[in-house]
Amino acid sequence: MTVKELSETPGFKAICLPDPERRIEGGYCGDLLSWVMGRAKASQAWVTIMSNMNIAAVATLCDTAVIVLSEGVQPDSGVAETADSRGINLISTDMPTFEAAAAISKLI
Amino acid sequence: MNESIRFTFNVDGSNFTTAGQASVQVKKNLRELGIPPEAIRRVSIAMYEGEINMVIHAHGGTAEVIVYEDKIVIVLSDRGPGIPNVELAMKEGYSTAPDNIRSLGFGAGMGLPNMKRYTDDMKIDTEIGVGTTITMTVNF
């Protein structure tokens, strides 16, 4: 599925979608950025509660398809703008990380 | 490509939120040069970890990336406090990062191990009170 399709799924909400047609191929959950960076793969949906500016760099370097902020977490000030300018898709959901990952897994 | 291409960056040690700019730029530059994607991923992740380390521990430094015909060499230099025990620092999970850094998702003790994992060769030259230079090579 595409990132846009995920953003239109009930329970998920787009924060910024500079690359809406990007396809999601798998997913990764994690909040320790070094751990994520060592393991997340390109084109995955990355589900995290980390909301600081460094997630934009990690997503860029890992080339993930989308960052999904779970548990109702909102991005810190300036993160959405930076993500948008770097072509990083950002989606939020109130679902806990486990439920968000399970939902994405069913959809892709 | 017979001659090497060199990129040099200053890593600003004062702003943690902008850390990673050099790595992101290197990724872009390497893409433009047509370097294989997996090599780009390895270089940019190893370099980002190094950048973060320089910001956390050494108030910044310099990063140099040299692109050869079949390999990329990354040289990260700082004038920080040096690493007292390299063997310990290389252990996954060992970290001396402060709590405020941990709350941002770093300081998990994965930096140096990730740098080693993602490169074909890594050499650490460090001297207490003088600084640290890490040289990493990625073959492709």
Image (tube, coloured by chain):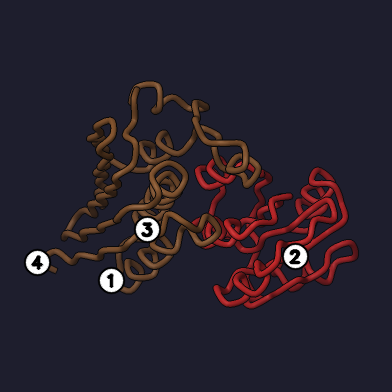
Chain colours: A red, B brown
The amino acid at mark 3 is: Val
Whole-number angstrom distance, CA of label 1 to CA of label 3: 23 Å
Q: Is residue A18 left or right of residue A108?
A: left
Q: Is residue B30 above or below residue A32?
A: below
Whole-number angstrom distance, CA of label 2 to CA of label 1: 32 Å
Q: Residue at x 85, y 56 (%)?
A: A72
Of labels 1 and 3, earlier in sequence is 3
In the rendered image, residue B71, in percent from the top left (x then y), is placed at: 21, 53
Q: Nearer the viewer, mark 3 or mark 4?
A: 3
Tell me whether the residue at label 1 lies in contact with that at label 3, contact meaning CB atoms closer than 8 angstroms.
no
What is the crowding at mark 4: few (fewer than 14 residues within 10 Å), some, or many (at least 20)? few
In the picture of the structure, the residue carrying the numbered disc 2 is A91
Q: Is residue A1 above or below residue B136?
A: below
What is the crowding at mark 1: few (fewer than 14 residues within 10 Å), some, or many (at least 20)? few
Whole-number angstrom distance, CA of label 4 to CA of label 1: 13 Å
Q: Residue at x 76, y 51 (%)?
A: A105
Q: Is residue B1 above or below residue B52?
A: below
Q: Chain of mark 1?
A: B
In the picture of the structure, the residue carrying the numbered disc 4 is B2
